[in-house]
Amino acid sequence: MSEPTSAKNYSFDSLSVVEFLYKWRKPLLLITSLAAVVSMIFTGPTFIKPRFKSTVVFYPATTNSISKALLNENAYDRSDPLAFGEEAEAEQLIQILYSDDIQSYIIEKYDLMNHYDIKPNARFRNTQLSKKFSDNIRFRRTEYSSVEIEVLDTDPVVAAGIANDIAALLDETKNKIQREQANKALKIVETQYQSKREFVNKLNDSLNFFRALGIFDYEVQIDHITDVYVKATSGAAESRAKLKVLRDKKVAETDTGIVNNEARLAGYEASSARLQQQLDLLGKYGGAYTSVKEQLEKENEELVKLRQRFDRAKVDVDEVLPVKFVVNSAKVAEKKTYPLRSIIVLLSTFGALLMSLLVLIAVENYKFLLARQQ
């Protein structure tokens, strides 16, 4: 049986593209037009709610301790409160952004359970809410070591509000965490400081006891009293010698030489006796006084250091510094970000055209095979 003329002369491989498209122009035009119309309808706000994007961009700060940044006298151990943080600081802030405190606050303030249309009696409603939250609110570290907060929402005002609130909550949350640690450190330092101050007061009371006895500065007093005592004993010995000489010469006791030397001798002896008492006192309490005084000096130095640590710890509790440098705050978006209807319509139309071409090519080849078998 001979092949039909149409089958003999027809070969899809030799058919030009223009002829093929012209032959099927109406079905192709109808299908692509229908695909374009359908994609425009189903990407409209009735089926897909448009979403708007707001973004906050900031750099992390390097300063964690205010006292270390501002009150530290050691320049090599002082951090710069104006320096931008690097990768490690950015990752730390991202971890804080994922904290339950921030998420709970945003969910409650914006009533996201209702805002995301999650039914109150829905099964796994919290899981659904968490999924929606993570889909619409994202945090990432950029290639420039900054941190980006990106929020998508059907309401552009809500999107900007959530982004800015999260950025503001970051300072509050991190400072809260650090303040908890600072409070613990403050209590420890305060306890040590109070204990040291009580001990210093006891040492001062001991010194006051020695001062009441007449011991004010052992080293100075012992040197001075010893010097005066030596002079007094020397003077007494000299007076005795002069009196002996005068009496050996049978000078009358009423002689002025004898009277004056006896007066000087009495003065020297009285002074020596008084000085001896002071030397005995210094000898008895001098060692204890010196020990207490030296210990007090050391304890006062430690007290000063503890006071400085206490003041710094109190600053860390009472004062805060921003944990970030905001580059861009979130603005209310004027145009939607999703869906991009033009791109979806274009891809849908092109996909429908391509699929139609493949189907028509398959149909043409099938007809050709049937024609060859006849």
Image (spheres, rainbow, N blue to C red):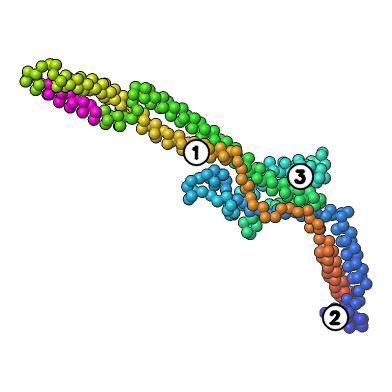
- Amino acid type of the residue that numbered disc 2 sits on in the rendered structure: Ser
Please name whichever residue, 79 or 152, is drawn nearer the observer in this view of the structure: 79
Q: Which residue is mark 3?
A: 129
Name above or below for residue 332 compared with residue 186. below
Callout 1–callout 2 Cβ contact below 8 Å: no
Q: Which quadrant of the view contains residue 275?
A: top left
Which residue is drawn at the image coordinates 10% and 16% (left, top)? 252
Disc 2 marks which residue? 16
Provide the secondary structure element on which disc 1 rests: helix
Task: Tell me the quadrant of the picture where the C terminus can be found.
Answer: bottom right
Q: Position of residue 103 (x, y in %)?
A: 71, 43
Q: Is residue 135 left or right of residue 65?
A: right
Q: Is residue 83 visible?
A: yes
**Location of mark 1 (residue):** 308
Compute the Cα span from label 2 to label 3.
Answer: 56 Å
Cα–Cα span, label 1 and label 3: 49 Å
Q: Residue at the top extreme?
A: 253
Q: Magenta span covers which residues? A: 227-243
Task: Name the amino acid, label 1.
Answer: Gln
Is disc 1 surrounded by few (<14), some (14 to 19) or many (20+) residues within 10 Å?
A: some
Q: Position of residue 193 (x, y in %)?
A: 49, 32
Up the image or down, 5 lies above or below 133; here it is: below
